[in-house]
Amino acid sequence: MWDNYPFGASPSPHVTRRHLYNVENLKDHARFFFEHYGLTERDLERYLAAALSAGGDYADLYFEYLSSTSLMVDESMVKSASQGISAGCGVRVVSGERTGYAYTDDLSSDRILHAARTAALIASAPAKATVQGFQKSQARSLYPVTLPSVDAEISAKVELVMRADKAARAFDPRIKEVRASYADELRNILVVASDGTFAEDSQPLARMNVSCIAKTDSNSARGTSGGGGRVALDFFFGEKTPEYFAKESARQALLQLDAREAPAGEMEVVLGPGWPGVLLHEAVGHGLEADFNRKKTSAFAGLVGKRVASEKCTVVDNGTMPWRRGSLNVDDEGEPTQETVLIEKGILKGYLSDKLSSRLMGIADTGNGRRESYEHIPMPRMTNTYMLAGQDNPEDIIRSVKHGVYAVNFGGGQVDITNGKFVFSASEAYMIEDGKITAPIKGATLIGNGPDVLTRVSMVGNDLKLDEGVGTCGKDGQAVPVGVGIPTLKVDRLTVGGTARKDTGGFMQ
Amino acid sequence: MTPTELETGNPKLETDLREVAQDIVARATKAGATAAECVVREGDEFSTLVRLGQVETLKESGSRSIGVRVFFGQRAASTYSSDFSTAGLDRMLKSALELAKITSEDPFSGIPSADQLGQLTTPLDLYHEDVYSLPGAARIDYARRAEKAALDTDPRIKNSEGGSFDAATGHKVLANSHGFVGEYKRSYCSVAAVPIAQTPEGAMQRDYWYSVARTLKKLDSPEHVGKVAAERTLRRLGAKKVKTSKVPIVFDPMVSTSILEHIFEGINGDSVYRGASFLAGKLGQKIAGDIVNVIDDGTMPGGFGTSPFDGEGIPTRRTVVIENGVLKSYLLNTYTAKKLGLQTTANASRGLAGTPGIGPGNYFLQPGSKSPKDLIGGIKEGLYVTEFLGQGVNLVTGDYSRGASGLWIQNGELTFPVEEITVAGNLKELFFNISEIANDLEFRGSVAAPTIRIEGLTVGGE
């Protein structure tokens, strides 16, 4: 429970579209909605009571105030700069397995009550559940907003994109086109629920991206690089500079100028550390989200306790890593995030759950209930998903391959969770011939089967790395930031979608 | 344009959105902006999902938002907000005016000239109140009926991701400092089913089908949608990998639209002026086989890509993009047209923030005369693709590599289902290798293409 809020009585229904404030003046994220929208504890109870008025079992409110900035430099000019604010409240009512949802972008009492009554209609009985006393969740600070990035001097952000442009062009005269962008946001949330949940958080998110096109008389190629996390602006002046991303982007573009045809068919594949962890996200992560398993629509349904990977594989989802893009102090249902073991030494241990699946399946809530915004219903989602480091030396892993592909950078991926088939598209890859990395190859899609691809992991490196902070995951039309990571991995057999003939094996014409 | 009353389940918003937009523009110029443009959007959505006969979710809401773009000479910036209070709008405008100080002088920036502005006045048939006319119980029933039809088709369909019914309306207003003000409303409804079929061994497959329309009257029956979804799902049961090979490939209309999207990505002005596409500079040249004709038409009554004016207030039009394989026109907005020394094709698409992008109107591949069955009938050994997985397309180089599933063609017939394969090649050749185009063009969105046959691609498998 919290003590005195600044505005004693509940405001009249028409007052509430309050004056908007400057986030830069805000020192402490706690009580954001109370101080700025005149919200009171009594209001929250009233809204929840309205949500439960038709007999729902559970109701929650998700208040969100999102402030964003983005800048882009193209042709060495800052062509685009934008800022915006989006605020609203989503009301959810659960009755058995049914969910009613309504939202409003107007935080006045009458509009929130209207949304609550609309969501309430999912149930049709006299009110039975009551609102429990609010229990404020334990404050945690994985990403303290020391320097409020969102409203920091805009000129510093301009400097970042201009420096990236300059560094990419300076890298090589063949770099002809450069686009560098910077985007950040600060999301203030308040989640309260009829079960007593009360959680506030202030979630920063920043990202830089640099894309280059390299051109010669005969060829063109592209490269992209980027990164960030739940960090402040100083991150890009210290740990990961614009020059770092610019050089990486330019390097990839130049490399692709000389890339040869990728091979086609099944072969040994070595994945480099870091972002290639998108393999885990697609091959196993989505399939282990509890909603799909509750509905038995996932290829992983019923496999808890069974072997789904080789003994060398231990996979976790961890929302508690400081500064990481996929991290959260609390999930979007107000539940603290945690580290959840998904696969331990090859055995499937459990699923990623939200409140609804946790209750309906009788499993623990792992703090993975997430949503894109107040307009969306939360569901089980990943945070940072990675494989723990193994014993193998990365060089030995490469040396063990006679003929295969070494893939170190990827675009995105996709999975069909029902039949388990997944893809991920390599953007930087090389041939491995007789244990040596040889020529770079053109981008190619890799395709496999989620429930058995990890059983073919025969070597796991000692070099676990997480990605730079670029991942955005989409599910049912909702986008949320995530992280992935792996050590260097060897998969004994995976289908590579190139165009070149294999040296051996039948190639039907 | 005569304003029509927007019927929603929400309390009425009293504000006149045209006045709000015009007022923001007037205040921006009064504050010193040399040009300004304001967009206001308002919408309502309803959706319901029924799974295994039970309502699983019910969602209903409305929202609105506003965005402004201001120019100081050749510098521009934009801001947006969901807050329509006086203070909220003040802050939005003030931020835009400040932000414009830090952007660069871009000689090609600006809103269209006054003589380019305008809107179609012919009836476009985009808005039908009937998408919200069904009572709540009947909407749920649409979803239930679609799922039930799928479940009833075959005992191998025991599970489902559900049947759904969605309805939405959107209202858009655009105003700028040349005095342009326009608005339009569009409606939408859809019914879908996503069944899951299972083999006796437990292997599962899912597929889906849907119908979408601007009015309930044009929506297919839920029973039809459910049945087609079931058939598409059942035919995937028992799918297997095939050997790596190079064979003719037939693209189902659900995936042939992706080829049109790649062409769009390659010929839109933004890719062209940056040289980010292998099609840049190819105007007037052959980029595809003789049989390929591609049209973009933002004026088709009732179309999913139709509007009276584009994102910058220019009347939409019909543009021949590819004629007999020759690239006749890029698709452009004002900025990219100026960069390339051409005229805009009225394809500006305007979000709330940022510079306008480029979007298609009703963008389609002209159909041929053969039936899809005839296309398949002419193939001895080949692949019929029904679904792609992942992206895997590089417009700079044309490299093309995608995950796929579908059915194997033997002696002119669809035989067994295939999955966990890739389809790869290069778009430079692929566009020339479209060897046949069927007659089954149907708009299920703003981009449409009939069944097509493509030669020379590599199927990656075992």
Image: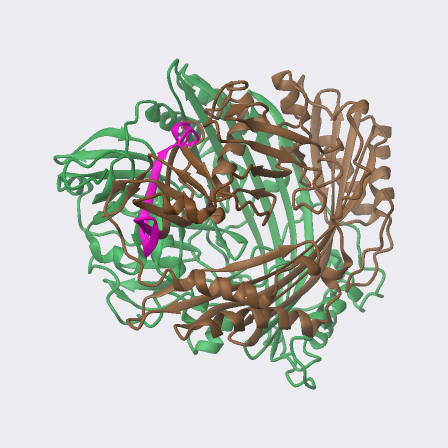
Chain colours: A green, B brown
Residue B49 falls left or right of residue A82: left
Above or below, A182 against B414 in this view is above
Whole-percent x, y for residue A358 in the image: 46, 73
Whole-percent x, y for residue B434 in the image: 42, 34
Q: Which residues are magenta?
A: B407-433
Residue B73 falls left or right of residue A147: right
**How many discs mark residues in the rendered view?**
0
Above or below, A398 against B345 in this view is below
Residue displayed at 50% across by 66% down:
B227
Q: Is residue A64 magenta?
A: no
Residue A48 falls left or right of residue A111: left
Above or below, B376 against A345 in this view is above
Residue B314 falls left or right of residue B422: right
Q: Quadrant of the N terminus of chain B?
A: top right
Residue displayed at 58% across by 31% down:
A157
Q: Is residue B428 magenta?
A: yes
Question: Between A395 and A508, which is closer to the camera in this rendering?
Answer: A508
Q: Is residue A407 visible?
A: yes
Question: Between A239 and A363, which is closer to the camera in this rendering?
Answer: A363
Q: Is residue A465 visible?
A: no
Whole-percent x, y for residue B270 in the image: 57, 27
Question: Between B108 and A90, which is closer to the camera in this rendering?
Answer: B108
Magenta segment, prevailing SS (helix, strand or loop): strand
Whole-percent x, y for residue B97 in the image: 75, 31
Residue displayed at 55% across by 63% down:
B225
